[in-house]
Amino acid sequence: MKLLRLLPMTAMALASMSAMADSTTDLVNALVAKGVLTEEEGKLLSKGHESEKAAQDKVLEKSSKAGGKVTISDAIDNATIYGDIRARYEFRRGEDSSNITEDRERGRYKLVLGVKTNAGDFYSDIALSMGANGRSDNSTFGNAANSSNGSNTKETVYVKRALLGWKVTDWLKVEAGRVANPLYTTPMVWDGDLTFEGLVEKVEYQWGKVNLFANFAQSQYIGDRQDFTIINNDRVTNDLMAFQGGAKFDINERVSAKAALTFTKFSNDHAPGAGPFVPGLGSDSGRGVSLGTTTTATNDIRTIEIPAEVVFKLNDSMKLMAFSDYVTNLDGKDRYEAAVAAATASSATRGAVIRSAGHDDKAWLLGVGLSSQQGKQPKRGDWSSRLWYQDVGIYALDPNTVDSDFMDSRVNMKGIVLKGEYFLRDNVVVNLAVGHANRKNDKLSAAASQSDIALNLDSFSLYQMDITYRF
């Protein structure tokens, strides 16, 4: 109890000392102005007082840490706790080529809790979240382990991020561990909840009026390397390499632009015996029908992606945005030929259908957005909306990474999405999202590695409404 009483008194004393130091500096400046002291003598006196003030401020900061409800190591310069809680209502409807439909209605909730720290040039980001799937932090109401009542069990919390960073220079950062996706991209290519496991380098450099940026990622995608001298006994593994360069710049006082060029490669060198990606047929129908063979396979994926946006400042708070994304798989034809060969080996008929469907290895997105924001940080009353159309070929993208919501985690889909959000308070947001999509190539399945609708989709609709509390 004595310690608790002494801490406020100590803080007050130190604050008084700091104020005295400020007064002394003012007095020295006045004496120099009147010619009592030379400028050199004034600088020497001021420098001494500034050093004393800096030391006092540091002691005051540590004293405040000790007297707070949360304490951190003296080695840590600062720590920030952050997170969000979200509740969601969701409705999904899917229909296959035989007019079989599935309606899925559910309530969901999400929790993310994290802490960021800084210690000199080093920093960290640790975040916990719900949802075992990398593309979703959600848990569904009543979904419990061992098929028991959800209200009588507890949910599992997973490690979402475990990041160690080093600010090497003003323009270079290096991060290792389970890190946030560093790439400038869109949900068509990368789901927003996905993270990378490995090493990331980030570059930001101001060149005149142009902000240049580059992001590089070396990620262990599946498994670790384990090589044997015995044939076909190596561990099945896969690496992901991404290299991105881009620029953000002002065209004039009211118009700005941003664009990037990204090269991504998935390696399959150490996956002996692993089969290639083979899509199912569009005519396959019914509940639980197969969407293909080895739909998680990332063989023959080497993409070029070009995301871009142009922002028009309409007034002090309102902005209009046009945005786009384009992807081509440089190895799309090889991915197609591998699928044809594997399908033909098991069924000549299925192989012929897949061959006739062609090698669609392109994906593109085009959209517009309108927003109103009062300052740099969102405030009560701010809002934003986005509308876009996307078209994804069967061999264009990795089915494991595409957005899990609006196309139900699938490729070979095309459709439109509308999203809007409104800030009820600075930290409370209401979101509404609507999407509709159709299968692009009717000869092939709407392939997915995981999906929420248990049909080979011919059409798909999604409605979501949620409220998020941020802290």
Image (cartoon, rainbow, N blue to C red):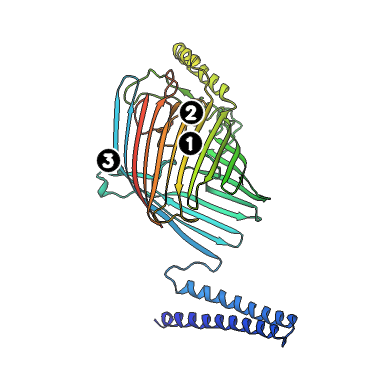
Foreground: disc 3 or disc 2: 2
Q: CA distance from mark 3 to mark 1?
A: 42 Å
**Circle 3 — which element?**
helix
The quarter holding residue 334 reads top right
Q: Amino acid at mark 2?
A: Val
Q: CA distance from mark 2 to mark 1?
A: 15 Å
Q: Check the picture and name the quadrant holding the N terminus.
A: bottom left
Using a 10 Å C-alpha cutoff, classify the residue at mark 3 as few (fewer than 14 neighbours), some (14 to 19) or many (20 or more): few
Q: Which mark is residue 147?
A: 3
Foreground: disc 2 or disc 1: 1
Residue marked by disc 1: 367
Foreground: disc 3 or disc 1: 1
Q: Amino acid at mark 1?
A: Gly
Residue marked by disc 2: 392
Q: Give the camera-side residue of 366 and 108.
A: 366
- Residue 264 drawn above or below residue 358: below
In the picture, measured across the screen, residue 42 lies left or right of residue 463, that is: right
Q: Residue at x 57, y 78 (%)?
A: 56
- Residue 211 drawn above or below residue 305: below
In the picture, measured across the screen, residue 239 lies left or right of residue 384, that is: right
Asked if residue 242 shows in the view, the reply is: no
Q: Earlier in the sequence, mark 3 or mark 1?
A: 3
Q: Amino acid at mark 3?
A: Ser
Q: Earlier in the sequence, mark 2 or mark 1?
A: 1
Marks 3,1: beta carbons within 8 A: no
The quarter holding residue 8 reads bottom left
**Circle 1 — which element?**
strand
Q: Give the camera-side residue of 449 and 98.
A: 98
Q: Give the camera-side residue of 435 and 123.
A: 435
Q: CA distance from mark 3 to mark 2?
A: 36 Å
